Amino acid sequence: MVAVAGVVVVVVGDSFSLSPSSSSSAWQTRRKFLFLLDMLLACRLFSLWLSPTTASSFLSNRNRIEHQQQSSMSCLSPSTVFLSPISSISKVTIEEEWVSTSLKSPKTKNQLKTLHAHIIKTGLTRNDLVFGQLFLCCSISNSMQYARQIFDGIDDPKLFFYNAMIKGYSQNGAYDEALQLYSLMRFRAITCDSFTFPVVLRSVSSLGKVDVGKELHGLVMKMGCGSRVIVQTSLIDMYCACGLSNYGRYVFDAVSEKDVICWNTMISGYIKCGEYSSAQELFDRMPVRNISSWNTIVDMYCKRGKLERARSLFDEMPERDVISWNALISGYVKTGESEAMRRVFDEMPQKNVVSWNVMITCYVHNGHFMEALELFRMMLVSDVKPNEVTVVGVLPACAHLGALDLGQWVHAYIDRNRVKMDVYVNTALIDMYGKCGSVEDAKRVFNNAVVRDTFLCSTMIEVLGTHGKADEAFLIFDYMRREGIKPNDVTFVGLLKACSHVGLVDTGMKYFQMMNKEFKLMPKVEHYGCVVDLLGRAGHIEEAHELIKNMPMDPHPIVWGTLLSACRIHGNVKLAEEVAVRLIELEPHSCGNYVLLSNIYSKAGRWTEAAKLRRKMKEKGVMKKPGCSSIEVNSVVSEFFAGDRTHPQCKAIYETLDQIIARLKAEGYTPCTSSVLHDVDVDEKEQVLLHHSEKLAVAFGLISTDHKTPIRIVKNLRICDDCHLFMKMISTYYSRQIIVRDCSRFHHFTDGSCSCSDYW
DNA sequence: TTAGGGTTAG
C-alpha cells in the first residue's frame, strides 16, 4: 500500500489530476480513476514483465551509465552522489535513456502499461519528448487505442501530442481516426504547425478526400506554411493521390527550391494518375536523381509489363539496392516469366522479406502451391524473418492443398512470433481453415478478429455456405448490416452459394433481388450463375433455362455447365443434349462437358449415344482431366490419381482398400458403374471405379491416422456418386469422420450420412 | 520520395 500511495503522489502531481477543480466530467473522472488503478497495478508488476534478456541488458546498461557517472564524480562520497542535485539530474538522464531505448521497439499491451507506469513513477511525464515517444511506441505496437486512452487522460494536450497521435493513427492506417482527431484539434482552436500538415495530408491522400485536402491547402497558405518544401511535397502527393495531377503540378511548379524528394513525389504522382510519359519526361529533366528516383521509374516499366525497358534502365542505374532488385522480380512476375524471375531472385546480392514475399505470392498466384511452401521452408532457414505479408502469401497455398496441419503450424508461428494479426491475416486464416474443412477454427478466428471488413465477412460467409451452414452465413450478413459493413458483389456470391447448397430457393431469390434494390450492386454473370445453380439443383430447370435466355449479358460457358449439371441431377436428358451441344460448340476442347453428357447418357441407359460421344472426344483429341485427391498426414501432403501406384506405401494402401471393399460389399455395397466413362466391360469398369483417387486417399488415411482423427481429402473434380456412397459407408462401418472437399463444396461424412444431404 | 498481402458462379 505504501508503494501504491507513493505512486499516487507522483500521479496526482502530474497531468492526471483528480482534484475537484478539474473540469472533467464525472464520467471522465471515473474513467481516469479506473485507468489510474490499472497503472498502479502495472507499477507494482513492473519488475515482473522484463524477460531475462531485457532485464539483464537494462541492468548492464544502467550499471554502465552509473559506473561512468560515478567515475566522473569519484571525488564525492557515495552518499554525496545520491544526495547532490547533480545526481538527481543524472538519474533522470539514465531513466530517460533507458525509457527512450525501450520505446523504440514494439511492445505488448502489458509492456506498454508497465513502461507507462514507469514513466509516471519516475516523473518523466514532464518530458514531452518521452511522451511523444510513448505515443509512437503505441503506434509501432499497433496499440493506438491505448495511446488514445493516455491522450484522453491529458488535460489540455499540447500541439506536439496531437501531432504525435495523428502521426500514430496515420502509421497504423487509421486515416479516419487521424482526420477525426485533426477536426477535434481545430474545434478546440489548437493552432497547427508545419509538422501537422504532412501527417494530416497523408491521411487525406489515403482516403482520397480531396475536399478536405483543398481546405487544408487553404489553411497552409493562411498559416504561412506554403513555402515549406515538406508541406508543398505533401500537397503534391495529396492532389495526385486524389487523381488531380494538374493541381499537383501547379504546386510543384511553385516550389522555389525543389529537393529530390519533391521531384520524386511529382514523378510518383504522375504514375499514380497513369500519366507515364509525363513521369518519364520529368525523370529526364531531374537535375539530381537518387536511388528512389531510379527505382520509381524502373518499377513503373515493370508494372506496365515493359520488361526490356525496365531491364535496360536497371542496368543503367548508377547503384542498386534491394528495392531495385525486388522491382525487377515483380516485373518478371507480371510478365509470367517465372524462370527469369527465379534467376534474378537467386542472383540478387541481398534478399529481404519483400523479395521472399514476392516470390511466394507469385508461386501461389500461378497455382504452384508446393513450390510456394518449399520457398517458405527455405525462408524459415534463411536469415530473413517472415512477416504478415508472408503468411498471407503462404496460407492460400495451405488452403488450396487442404494442408490443415501446415496451416495450423503457420497460425501457431503467427502467435509465437507476434506476427501482426491484421485484417488480411485474419481473412487468410478464415479462408485456410474453411478450405481445409475446419469450420470451427474459421469461426474462432472470425470471433477473435478485432477489425472485420467486407472481405473478412464475405470470406466467412463463403466458408459457412460451402460447408452447408446457410443459417450461420445469413447471421454474418445480418451482422454486416448492423455494423454498417458494406457488402460487395462477392458477399452476394457467398450468400447465393449458401442458399444453393441447401436448396433455399426463395431466400436465394430474395438476396438476388436485394443486391440491386438495397445495395445498388448490379448482378454480374457470377450471380446469374449462382441463381441458375440454385434453381436448377432444386429442380426448377425450365426457370433456370429461361433465366439464362433472358440474362442481360452473354452467358459464360460456366452458366451453361451449371444447367447441364442440374440436368444430370434430375435426369433431364432432352435439355441436357441441347445444352451440351451448345457448350461443346463454345468449348470444344473442355472435357468436363463431354463427361457430364456421357454420364447423363449412361445413367439413362443410352449406351450407344455414350459410345458415340466418346468417339467424338477421341477424334477431337479431348483428354479427360485426371481426378486427383490429396491428403495431408503428419504435415506431408500426398497426392493420388486413379489407379496410382507411385506412393511409397502403395502395397499397404491397395491391400487396405481391398479389405474395405470386401467388408462394404458384405454390408450391401454395389459399385455404381454407370458413372464410369470408359468403353470397357463391367468388371473393368468396377476396377476403374474402385481405384478412384479419393478411395486410395481414404485407404491411406485409414492406415496412417488414429481412429479419432478425421480424414480430410481434397479432390480436384466433383466427387462421383459411387465414391459418395463409399465414404458414407466407411463413416459407419469404420466409425470415422471423413471430410471431402470437392471442386464445388464440402462433404462431411459421419455415421452413414453426408452434410450435403445427398444434394450436390 | 521507391518494393510485397485477403473473399467470388459448374
Image: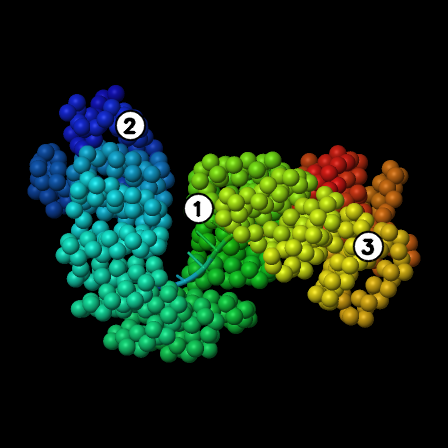
Secondary structure state at the residue bearing disc 1: loop
Secondary structure state at the residue bearing disc 3: helix
Is residue A67 visible to us here? no
Residue drawn at x 84%, y 55% is A601
Q: Are marks 3 and 1 in contact (CB under 8 Å)?
A: no
* Three-letter code for the amino acid on which mark 3 is drawn: Lys
Q: Nearer the viewer, mark 3 or mark 2?
A: 3
* Three-letter code for the amino acid on which mark 2 is drawn: Arg
- Give the chain of mark 2: A
Label 1 sits on residue: A422
**A61 and A349: which is toward the camera:** A349
Label 2 sits on residue: A31
* Three-letter code for the amino acid on which mark 1 is drawn: Asp
Residue drawn at x 56%, y 56% is A373
> Mark 3 packing: few (<14 Cα in 10 Å), some, or many (20+)?
few
> In 3D space, how far apart are the residues under numbered discs 3 and 1 (Cα atoms)?
52 Å
**Label drawn at residue A102:** none
Q: Which image quadrant: the N terminus of chain A?
A: top left
Horizontal side of A126 relative to A651 (left or right) equals left
